[in-house]
Image (cartoon, rainbow, N blue to C red):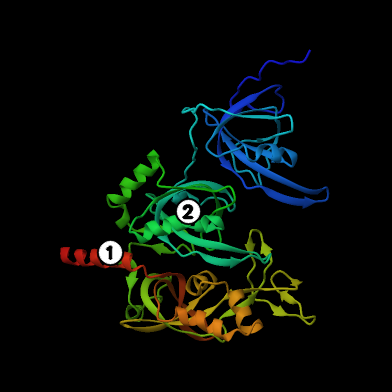
Amino acid sequence: MKNEAPARIIPIAALNPYQGRWAVKARVTAKGDLRRYNNSRGDGKVFSFDLLDSDGGEIRVTCFNAVVDRFYDKIEAGKVYMISKGSLKPAQKSFNHLKNEWEIFLETTSTVDLCPDEDASIPRQQFSFRPICEIESAENNSIIDVIGIVTAVNPSVPILRKNGMETQRRILNLKDQSGRSIELTLWGDFCNREGQNLQELAEAGFSPVLAVKAAKVSNFTGKSIGTISSTQLFINPDSAEAQTLREWFDQGGKDIASQSISRDNMPVGSKIETRKTVFQIKDEGLGRSEKPDWVTVKATITFIKTDTFCYTACPLMIGDRQCNKKVTRSGNSRWQCDRCNQEFEECDYRYLLQAQIQDHSGLTWVTTFQESGEEILGCPAKELYMMKYEEADDTRFSEIIRNCLFTQFLFRLKIKEEFYGDEQRVKITVVKAEKVNHSAESRYLIDLISKFRLS
C-alpha cells in the first residue's frame, strides 16, 4: 500500500540519501541566475538556490531543464518554503561552498510550497565571519565570509574577458579590528549595484560596514578577496557584528593604522602617517633601505609615454591566475610563451606605463602596471592598443591620454632600490591610483590642521 502520510519535517543537518520520505522547512538565502549549457548530451538549463533552516543547517538545491520551468519563477530569496520529494546527491564542492556534504536535486515529482506565515525562528542569513588577519593564512580559492569597514571605493572600470565579453570591475578596501585591511574586487553587476551605492556613501563622507557572504580568496601578490556568482553583499547590516565594528571605528578605529594583506603586503597606515610629497621621496632617501617604502602622494599626471605603454602577455592560466609573462612572435606568426612552453593565436595586452607626476614640491617618474594603469586610464590595455595600432584612431587615443593629464590622483607608491645592469636606481611603482575625492580630501586637510593645532 502506498504511504500517503505527509512527510515529516527534519533538520537539514539530518538529511541523507538513505531516508525515505522527508521534508525541510527553510528560508531561501540566495538564488542563482538561470544558466544555459551545452554538452555531449545536448542543450540544457540549470539554476540553484541555498536554504537555511531554524537549526542553522544549510544546503544547496539544484534544478535542471523541465524542473527549472516549474520552480524558477516560484523561488524568491528571503521567503520560507516547505520542500520535499527531492533526491540527495554528493555536493559538488568545486561549485558549492556550503558546509554540507549533500545537495538536493529537485525532480518533476518534487513539491515546493511557500509558507505564508513568516517564521521568525529561521534567520535571514547565516555568516561565519573570519577576521581579516586570518585571511592571510586562508587557502587560495577558498570561500569565506568577512565583515569590515569600507575605507576606499575605486571607480568601476570595464574589463575585457578572454572570451571577448566585456565586464565591470571595481576594487574596494576593507579594514577591521584585527589590524589588517584587504582588497575586495567586485565583478559584473556587483559594480553598478552595491558598488555604486558604496561609492555614493563614500563620496558623502560615510564609511559603511560591509558584510560579504561567500567571497573567494586569491593569493596573487598578497591576499585579496573577490565576488563570485553566489556572493552576497550586505551594506550596514542589522547585526551584532556590524554594530560592534561600527562602534570600534567611530570611537577611534578609523585613526588606527592597519596593514594591508593585499598587493605585496603593502602596509597602510593612517593617511597622516603615509602621506609624503615628491620632494620628500628623494630628500628622505626613501626606497634605499632593505625593505621597500610605501607612501601616498597627492600629485598630478603631467606626462605619459605613449610609444610603449603596454606589452604582449601570455593569456594562459597557471592554476587560477593568468601567466602574464611577456610573449614574442614565433616563426609561424603565432605567439610563444617561454614559461608555459606553448604557442597560441592571440595574446593579451597588459599596461607598463611610464608617467611623470608632479606636486607643489617637484616631479618624478613612476611605473604603472596593469591594475593601476586601468585605474588611471579607465580602459583595458588591449582596448587602447587596438585603438592605436589596429583601428588607427589617433583622435580617440589622444583624447583618453589627454583626459588623464593634469588630473589629481592619490598615488600609493612602492619605492625600492633596484639594479639595472651595474647601475643602482630607485624605482617608484604605482600600486594604486585614486582620483582625488575633493570632499574627502577637504575633511582630511581639516583633520590634519586640527591635529597640528593640538600638537
Q: Quadrant of residue 442?
A: bottom left
Q: Quadrant of residue 114?
A: top right
Provide residue 424's location: percent of width, then percent of height. 47, 83
Provide residue 347's location: percent of width, then percent of height. 69, 73
At x 71% / y 22%, what residue is drawn?
20
Quadrant of the rendering where the C terminus is positioned: bottom left
Closer to us: 2 or 344 = 2
Please say if 315 is above or below 77: below
At x 67% / y 71%, what residue is drawn?
314
Q: In this image, 174 relative to 443: left or right?
A: right
SS at circle 2: helix
Provide residue 279's location: percent of width, then percent of height. 33, 81
Amino acid type at circle 1 is Arg
Q: Which mark is residue 342?
A: none
At x 56% / y 42%, what residue is drawn?
30
SS at circle 1: helix
Please say if 411 is above or below 208: below
Q: Which mark is residue 443?
A: 1
Amino acid type at circle 2 is Glu
- Dot 1, crowdedness within 10 Å: few (<14), some or many (≥20)? few
- Dot 2, crowdedness within 10 Å: few (<14), some or many (≥20)? some
Q: In this image, 350 relative to 278: left or right?
A: right
Does residue 319 appear in this view? yes
- To which residue does mark 2 refer? 194
Q: Quadrant of residue 428?
A: bottom left
Quadrant of the rendering where the N terminus is positioned: top right
Closer to us: 31 or 185 = 31
Closer to us: 436 or 397 = 397
Q: In this image, 207 relative to 224: left or right?
A: left
- Dot 1 or dot 2, earlier in sequence: 2
